Amino acid sequence: GPVLPVFISANAVTLVGETPQAEVASVTFVAGAVSMNVTLQNFTIRPGGSVLTAGSNPIGLVIDGLTFNAPASPAINLTGVNPIVRNCRFVDPAGDVIWVFAGLNAQIYGNQVSDAGAAGNALVRLWTPYSGLQLYNNQFNYLRQLFTDNTFTLTNGVIRDNRGGVLGQGAAPPPPLTPCIGLNGGSTNVEVLNNVFSYTGAGVQGIVGNGANVTVRGNQITAVLAGVGDAIAFSGANWTVENNTIDLRLGGGANAITVAPGAVNAVLTGNT
């Protein structure tokens, strides 16, 4: 039979695939409905599909173990309070994987992005000031960015233990100097810990920010092409940059760490 879209406006809904290969065209939360305790689990979103929560404000949404084959951009448009996206697989995404549009305290972990190719943009992109994001234990390859605050402010966030291959992929789009982890919206009270990635592309940078009270610790950053930008660069107050391992042997003159004008009370220690 035909593969149909699903629309949700009720509470306490659990949608589970009979097998992981069971297909749904898309899942849309009805605008204006505040759905509580909805779980989407163990099925496949067909090519061009997505999970859309914009216009709704679900509470306690769990997206667990879904497979997105060649999904739309974004594959997930995430709003709501305390949402969880975990153990999902995104294959050949058409652009950004997850947009965070509203709400707070999202947890995004244990997901895998593969075969992104030239179209893969950001794993997570903010479209609003946001508090409480936790982005951890995800695997990726050939995306442009792991995370960007998109010039919005992330507060009280943690980006940790994400591991993958190459980020950056070239200068446009997004434009030159686009960082692999971007905190350029004045993001504050953020920890960037123990992430492992390589980066490429003319002018592409590793971890960049201009907010306050940011800790960058234990990351492994490797340049894989001459002409890339700095591995870490910041201009905010009270940054701690410590115990990071930076390999620029193929970086063609890029700086390991740039402390830019506007930086105050920076602590740099134990970086190699």
Image (cartoon, rainbow, N blue to C red):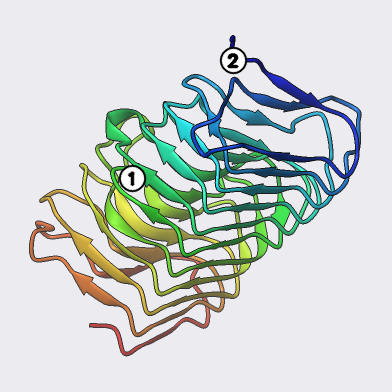
Name the side, left or right, on which 4 lies relative to 260: right
Determine whether 64 is above or below 195 in the image: above
Instruction: Choose between 238 and 231: the one closer to the eye.
Output: 231
Image location (x, y in percent) of residue 77: 65, 34
- Category of crowding for the residue at label 1, using alpha-carbon neighbours closer than 10 angstroms: few (below 14), some (14–19), many (at least 20): many
Q: How many marks?
A: 2
Q: Residue at x 20, y 51 (%)?
A: 228
Q: Circle 1 sits in a helix, a strand or a loop, which is it?
A: loop
Image location (x, y in percent) of residue 239: 51, 77
Instruction: Choose between 65 and 251: the one closer to the eye.
Output: 65
Specify the label residue 177 is tagged with: 1
Label located before the other in sequence (1 or 2) = 2
Confirm or deny contact between disc 1 and disc 2 (CB under 8 A). Answer: no
Quarter of the image containing the N terminus?
top right
Residue flagged by tag 2: what amino acid is it? Answer: Val
Instruction: Choose between 132 and 253: the one closer to the eye.
Output: 132
Q: Residue at x 10, y 51 (%)?
A: 226
The residue that label 2 is drawn on is 3
Q: Nearer the viewer, mark 1 or mark 2?
A: 2
Q: Residue furthest top?
A: 2
Q: Residue 138 occupies which quadrant of the picture?
A: bottom left
